[in-house]
Every structure is written in C-alpha cells, then in structure tokens.
C-alpha cells in the first residue's frame, strides 16, 4: 500500500521539525497522488532541487537532484515543473548545513 502525498509531506515536515530544520509547503499539490519536489535552500544564494525517482536496478525509491545552483535558477526549474504538473507539491527546506533528511530510511 502506498502512502498518499499529503501523508508523506506531513511526516517529512514533522521529521524535519524534530531536527530543528525549518521547512515550508510552497505549493500544495494533489493530496492523494501529487509528485513532490524538495528544494534545499542553504541560505547563501544557492539551492538544490530533488525529485523522487525509482532506481531501475534495485526498484528502490530514491531522491535524485533535478537542479542545483543559484536560487533563482532553481526557482525557474520549479516553475517549469509546475507548468507541466499543476498537482505538484513543492517543499522548501532551509538549512545552512545542507541537511534535508531525504536519505533517512524512515522517509522512504
């Protein structure tokens, strides 16, 4: 059974809060099946954008970088993705140390 997007997002935000990492829902997508993008803002003008993907070999769900660089460039990538998919969730994580917790097995 697959978790709904809204449930996963709420669990992710709660997990980030436990670590004291600020995060915000920038775009609320479809509650049930909307894809999720995570923007990591390192608060130095740089950002990275992650999308969930499948590892073809292992079948595991993994978070892959979609864009990185100057924050306006990453924001442009988000705008393009939202143009293709209006049901897309966008979560912004703000952490100078670059923590995003997407590699935490509890969030798989």
Image (cartoon, rainbow, N blue to C red):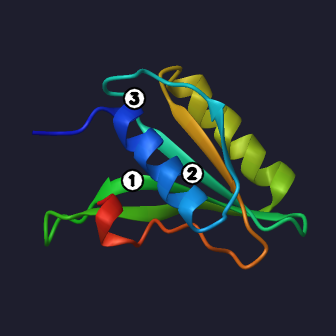
Q: CA distance from mark 2 to mark 3?
A: 13 Å
Residue 19: x %, y % from top left: 58, 68
Residue 21: x %, y % from top left: 66, 63
Residue nearer the viewer, 90 or 12: 12
101 to the left or right of 4: right
Which residue position holds label 3?
A: 34
24 to the left or right of 16: right
Residue 70: x %, y % from top left: 84, 62
Tally of numbered tags: 3
Which residue position holds label 1?
A: 52
Q: Residues within 10 Å of mark 1 (few under 14, many from 20)?
A: some
The residue that appears at 45% across and 65% down in the rendered structure is 102
The residue that appears at 76% across and 44% down in the rendered structure is 75
Quarter where residue 40 is shown:
bottom right
Classify 30 as above or below 13: above
Residue nearer the viewer, 79 or 44: 44
Residue nearer the viewer, 22 or 91: 22
Residue 66: x %, y % from top left: 55, 57
| Tag 3 secondary structure | loop
> Along the polypeptide, which appears first: circle 3 or circle 1?
3
Q: Residues within 10 Å of mark 3 (few under 14, many from 20)?
A: some
Q: Residues within 10 Å of mark 2 (few under 14, many from 20)?
A: many
Which mark, residue 38?
Answer: 2
Quadrant containing the N terminus is top left
Quadrant containing the C terminus is bottom left
| Tag 1 secondary structure | strand
């Amino acid at each position: 059974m697959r978790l709904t997007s809204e449930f996963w997002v709420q669990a992710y935000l709660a997990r980030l809060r436990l670590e004291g990492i600020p995060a915000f829902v920038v775009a609320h997508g479809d509650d049930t099946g909307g894809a999720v993008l995570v923007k990591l803002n390192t608060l130095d003008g740089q950002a990275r954008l992650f999308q969930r993907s499948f590892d073809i070999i292992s079948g595991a769900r993994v978070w892959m970088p979609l864009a990185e660089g100057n924050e306006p460039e990453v924001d442009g990538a988000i705008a393009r993705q939202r143009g293709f998919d209006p049901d897309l969730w966008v979560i912004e994580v703000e952490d100078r140390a670059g923590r995003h917790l997407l590699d935490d097995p509890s969030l798989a």
